[in-house]
Amino acid sequence: MEELICPECGSDDVEVIKERGRELTLRCNECGNVWIITLPKPVRVPLIVSKHERSFKSEVELPEGEEISVGDVVETEDDEVRITGIELDGDRRVERARVGEIKTLWGESLTYPKVIKVSIYMPKGLTQSFRVKVERDEEFAVGEVIEVGGYTFRIEKIKTERKMIRHGGAKAERIVALMGHHIPRARARRSLELYRGYRRETGQKQRDVTS
């Protein structure tokens, strides 16, 4: 529900004193004003939820007419999902649309670990590649020394969803890949856990949308 504001004094100290279906009777605790609002009709919107390499069909209940944008976070019955795509009729993709126009929402589960690709550049042009799982609010910085899969390397580049970072850092939530050269016998600041794949991580055999 969106924030309730008293139309008389502008206070947000508002309480629901009566509820009848979608009709709410409200009272302002600042000025005593009482008024009635009707909540928008809830609409069930199909939602495809990504858990790294797997995607699952779900749905989310949203108020009719509410504007949804890429990057918004919505809640389903058992998950929290960041919207990554909005599809209208005709398979047209847009950055924002109103509930009622939307055919399908696409999103990334925020309760599933963030999975990041790691590329470690070895001598003679070889590259060791891994996938690691990290907490979404964990931060990484260029110049940091990390250990992955028995290899120590210094982060030289951080690829995010929007750009390549060569100076500074970013939170794991926005990171796609970490890259850097192997540094033998260097002391790592931390070690990252390898990602074993959806089935091994969850122990579930839930079927995805491609099954």
Image (cartoon, grey):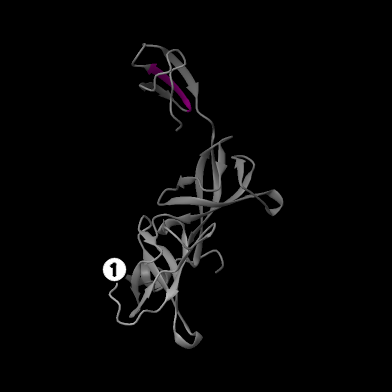
The residue positioned farthest toward the right in the image shown: 90
In the displayed structure, 93 sits above or below 38; it is below
Residue nearest the observer in this picture, 61 or 121 = 121
Spot occupied by residue 64 in the image (x, y as percentages of width and height) = 57, 35
Residue nearest the observer in this picture, 211 or 168 = 168
Residue type for callout 1: Arg
Residue visible at 39% across and 70% down in the picture: 132
Spot occupied by residue 74 in the image (x, y as percentages of width and height) = 47, 45
Q: Quadrant of the C terminus?
A: bottom right
In the displayed structure, 166 sits above or below 38; it is below
In the displayed structure, 191 sits above or below 61; it is below
**Residue 23 belongs to magenta span:** yes
Callout count: 1
- Mark 1: secondary structure: loop
Q: What residue would you read off at disc 1?
A: 189
Residue nearest the observer in this picture, 20 or 175 = 175
Residue visible at 55% across and 63% down in the picture: 209
Can residue 187 be spotted in the picture? Answer: yes
Residue 27: name its quadrant: top left
**Residue 38 belongs to magenta span:** no
The stretch of residues the image draws in magenta is 22-27
